[in-house]
Image: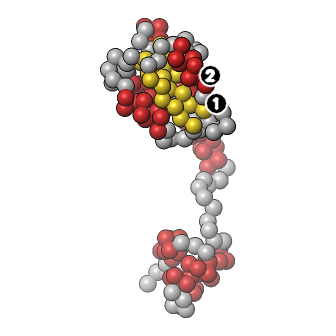
Amino acid sequence: MLIGYARVSTSEQNLNLQKDALSRAGCCKIFTDHASGATVNRAGLEEALKFAREGDTLTVWRLDRLGRSIKHLIDTIKMLEENGIGFRSLSESIDTTTAGGRLIFIIFGALAEFELNIIRERTLAGLAAARARGKVGGRRPSLNNKKREALKKLYFDKSYSAKELCEIFKISRTTLYKYINKDKPSA
């Protein structure tokens, strides 16, 4: 059985083009979503995946209707494949129930993995270069040195409670204790 899935990003957009194409392709049941591709939870897609059985084929009008990214698309198709469910994209003429369609997805997967490795290598090289120049990564401290010294003085003088200090310096209790424990005077 062909199962259709259609998605538009905003409520102003219309699903008719996709639904008509899916109907012409022979989809018996069509699930829909009005959600951005970046949205993780898409009720229509989840329903379609629950409805699909081994031997069925999930069909979309275009690849970008199914996946948020190439990685998400590949992960979804792998999950379909593991459950014995095929995948078909009408616009790109991809059909994983055929040998050619499976080959295309193997190539997509290899390219996605290659891209992730390149990004990882660039990131590590950039971090190493920054460290060599004396740059330290991470978030900037909540308090500058002067405020941190004032915080420690007030804390160790027991002039204010931890809660009051957090309110005064606009920091969390975790941040307060991080500064106190980091700079605790030796006994």
Q: Residue at x 57, y 19 (%)?
A: 20
- Which residue is painted at 49% across and 70% down in the image? 174
Find disc 2 in the rendering and name its residue: 17
- What percent of the width, then of the height, locates residue 60? 52, 22
| Quarter in which the C terminus is drawn | bottom left
Place of residue 2 in the rendered image (x, y in percent of width and height, measured from the top left) = 43, 17
Residue that appears at 55% across and 92% down = 159
Q: Position of residue 135 (x, y in %)?
A: 65, 53
Q: Is the residue marked by circle 1 packed among few (<14), some (14-19), or many (20+) residues within 10 Å?
A: few
Above or below: residue 170 compared with residue 77: below
From what the image shows, is residue 169 above or below residue 50? below
- Of 184 and 38, nearer the camera is 38
Residue type of the residue flagged with mark 2: Leu
Residue type pointed to by label 1: Asn
Front residue (pair 119, 13): 13
The answer for how far apart the CA atoms under marks 2 and 1 are is 7 Å
Residue 77 image offset from top left, x and y in percent:
44, 24
| Visible residue check, residue 185 | yes
Left or right of 81? Residue 130 is right
Label 2 neighbour load within 10 Å: few <14, some 14-19, many 20+: few
Q: Is 104 rendered above or below residue 79?
A: above
Q: Which residue is mark 1?
A: 14
